[in-house]
């Protein structure tokens, strides 16, 4: 991965390049990524630049033997550690080394736009918990104590470091504090609050900001050959998350379905709040919608609830007259305007809390019916207060 192919902004690239050029590389860094901000690619570009035999002022050469191995993620001094579990091919004692080949395929197939849910699906892991486990940590310690293959830096990239198993983490603390020379640890996470404080205190924080809308739109046109208008529409609603933008392009139907579900649900909430007649409340349509969502599984319900959260934020922006702050397509904007008097500065905090609570319950396998019905009746109270 070359810096020139990253979607992140120039300031971040310069920050990383500067660290290498000025030889002030902190040996343990925590890459805190905004959702879908390509953090794994950023980490690889940084590590590749550090190992390149012929780097320029602004990038790796892309041609030396180190770069060629980095391109395939097979450099022997690059150690990839990621959440894992037993799979069809690894039936016991799994670790990142045993699953290295499928992981590399997964990353390259997805052009580095990876997330934990896709990885779980790729492993066909179902409901199993994926963790960075004790064996992974033992492997790290073993590699840390041996010489590097190339004579240069050894790089350990821990993707989804928030999944470091609690009994495994203490093993790493001393190494993070006093690593062997020429060793770099990059821990990547999108969930800062789940990183153990003992790890936080031993790592330097590098923030990976959301990707610019313009960059997302441009990249969508390159990757999917879609119209400029559609690329901009999707860039507008993807909130700097290229992974999300990609899935939105791939699934226009999902966008339409989300909006349609939202209109069914919230129109009914508002009608109930205003004590309108039951033929206007159309509660049976809501019940049908909940049933359809439930049939599509936990992840689908979660993604709809996230859409709902974003929609309420948008409606609030309209309510306070901040049209600039609205992140939406033209069609949604038109629909949301009809709701702008129902989401206000006074009730929006509670409405968003309720949506987050629903996501939390869906994640913990509470029944769809219960979660959505609770949300439905609570919201009908909130929009009147
Ligand atoms: Zn090179």
Image: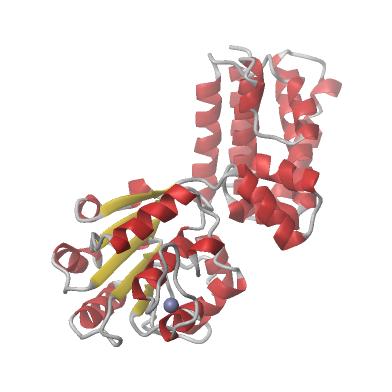
Residue 129 visible in the shown view = no
Residue 312 is situated, as x and y percent measured from the top left of the image, at 62, 28
Q: Quadrant of residue 270?
A: top right
Coloring applied to the structure: secondary structure
Residues 369 and 211: in front is 211
Q: Quadrant of residue 311?
A: top right
Residues 382 and 2: in front is 2
Q: Quadrant of the C terminus?
A: top right
Q: Residue placed at 65% from the left, 28% from the top? A: 326
Q: Is residue 183 left or right of residue 259?
A: left
Q: Is residue 179 above or below residue 233?
A: below
Q: Residue placed at 36% from the left, 83% from the top? A: 93
Number of marks: 0
Q: Is residue 80 left or right of residue 264?
A: left
Q: Is residue 71 above or below residue 287?
A: below
Residue 212 is situated, as x and y percent measured from the top left of the image, at 57, 44
Q: Residue placed at 51% from the left, 65% from the top? A: 127
Q: Is residue 220 above or below residue 350?
A: below
**Residue farthest to the front?**
57
Q: Is residue 16 above or below residue 213?
A: below
Residues 90 and 279: in front is 90
Q: Which quarter is ligand 1 in? A: bottom left
Residue 104 is situated, as x and y percent measured from the top left of the image, at 50, 78
Residue 34 visible in the shown view = yes
Residue 338 is situated, as x and y percent measured from the top left of the image, at 77, 20
């Amino acid at each position: 991965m070359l810096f020139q192919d990253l979607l992140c902004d120039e300031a971040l690239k310069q920050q990383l390049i500067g660290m290498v050029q000025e030889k002030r590389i902190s040996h343990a860094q925590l890459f805190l990524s905004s959702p879908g901000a390509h953090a794994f690619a950023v980490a690889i570009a940084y590590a590749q630049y550090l190992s390149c035999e012929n780097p320029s002022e602004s990038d790796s050469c892309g041609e030396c033997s180190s770069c060629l191995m980095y391109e395939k993620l097979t450099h022997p001094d690059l150690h990839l550690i990621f959440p894992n579990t037993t799979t069809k091919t690894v039936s016991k004692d799994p670790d990142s080394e045993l699953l290295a080949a499928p992981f590399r395929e997964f990353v390259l197939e997805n052009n580095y736009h990876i997330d934990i849910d896709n990885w779980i699906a790729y492993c066909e892991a179902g409901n199993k918990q994926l963790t960075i486990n004790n064996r992974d940590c033992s492997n790290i310690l073993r590699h840390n104590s041996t010489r590097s293959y190339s004579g240069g830096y050894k790089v350990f990239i821990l993707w989804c470091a928030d999944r470091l198993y609690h009994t495994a983490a203490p093993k790493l603390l001393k190494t993070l504090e006093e690593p062997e020379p020429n060793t770099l640890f990059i821990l990547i996470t999108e969930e800062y609050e789940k990183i153990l404080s003992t790890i936080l205190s031993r790592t330097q924080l590098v923030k990976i900001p959301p990707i610019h809308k313009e960059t997302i739109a441009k990249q969508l046109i390159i990757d999917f050959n879609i119209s400029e208008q559609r690329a901009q529409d999707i860039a507008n609603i993807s909130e700097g998350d290229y992974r999300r933008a990609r899935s939105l392009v791939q699934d226009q139907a999902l966008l339409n379905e989300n909006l349609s579900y939202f209109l069914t649900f919230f129109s009914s909430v508002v009608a109930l709040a205003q004590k309108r007649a039951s033929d206007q409340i159309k509660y049976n349509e809501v019940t049908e919608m909940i049933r359809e969502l439930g049939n599509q599984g936990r992840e689908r319900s979660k993604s709809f609830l996230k859409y709902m959260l974003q929609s309420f934020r948008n409606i609030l922006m309209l309510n306070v007259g901040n049209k600039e702050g609205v992140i939406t397509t033209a069609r949604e904007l038109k629909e949301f305007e009809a709701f702008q008097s129902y989401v206000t500065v006074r009730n929006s905090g509670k409405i968003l809390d309720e949506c987050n609570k629903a996501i939390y319950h869906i994640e913990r396998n509470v029944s769809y019916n219960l979660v959505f019905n609770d949300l439905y009746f609570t919201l009908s109270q909130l929009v009147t207060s």
